Image (spheres, rainbow, N blue to C red):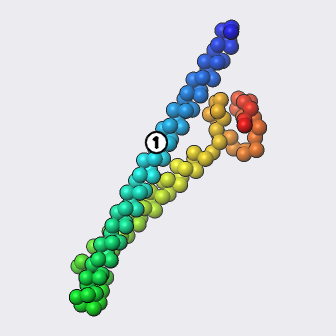
Amino acid sequence: MDVSNWKTFKDKALTAVNNAAQEVDHQLALTKLRVQLKHDQDLLDREYQRLGTVCYQSLSKTGSVSTGSPDIAPILTNISRYQDALRASQKAVDEAAASSSRTKCPACGTEITTPQAKFCSSCGNVLS
């Protein structure tokens, strides 16, 4: 193996390692976003359970439920806040997942914009 082939081999290996490291970082970030999404969903579920308990207690005591009740109003505020947080978390997960579904050249990491492409437009590598 001559020096120019060695340099080409080394460059391709470094590119592959860098691409793998970027993918690991991306998957780690996606996992963190999914954990946050699950946490937000759990908070919302817990608040819905609290609302059900408080409404049941109010109905059994007074026969009615008022959204202006000092027991119910803060729960409704929390539910609204948790729904907003859940929507934001879901949007972040969707955006991160969409960016990972894009095809990248395994040799140089260039994003492939044409799904039917047989070769990388940047480096000419054969795509499978």
**Where residue 94 sits in the image (x, y, percent)?**
53, 55
**Where residue 107 sits in the image (x, y, percent)?**
65, 29
- Of all residues, the one furthest to the bottom in this rendering is 63
Which residue: 69% across, 44% down?
Answer: 113
Residue 33 visible (yes or no): yes
Q: How packed is label 1: few (under 14 Cα within 10 Å), some, or many (20 or more)?
A: few
| Number of numbered discs on residues | 1
Residue 60, compared with residue 31, is above or below; it is below
Residue 114, compared with residue 65, is above or below; it is above
| Residue type, numbered disc 1 | Leu
Q: Quadrant of residue 80?
A: bottom left
- Of all residues, the one furthest to the top in this rendering is 2
78 relative to 2 in the view: left or right:
left
Which residue: 72% across, 37% down?
Answer: 128
Which residue: 30% across, 72% down?
Answer: 50
69 relative to 83 in the view: left or right:
left
**Where residue 87 sits in the image (x, y, percent)?**
46, 62
Q: What is the quadrant of the N terminus in the image?
A: top right
Residue 8, compared with residue 109, is above or below; it is above
Residue 77 visible (yes or no): no
Q: Quadrant of residue 112?
A: top right
**Where residue 126 sits in the image (x, y, percent)?**
74, 32
Q: Looking at the image, which is closer to me, 49 or 81?
A: 49
Q: Quadrant of residue 48?
A: bottom left
Q: Looking at the image, which is closer to me, 112 or 51?
A: 51
Q: Which residue is mark 1?
A: 28
Residue 65, compared with residue 37, is above or below; it is below
Q: Secondary structure at mark 1?
A: helix
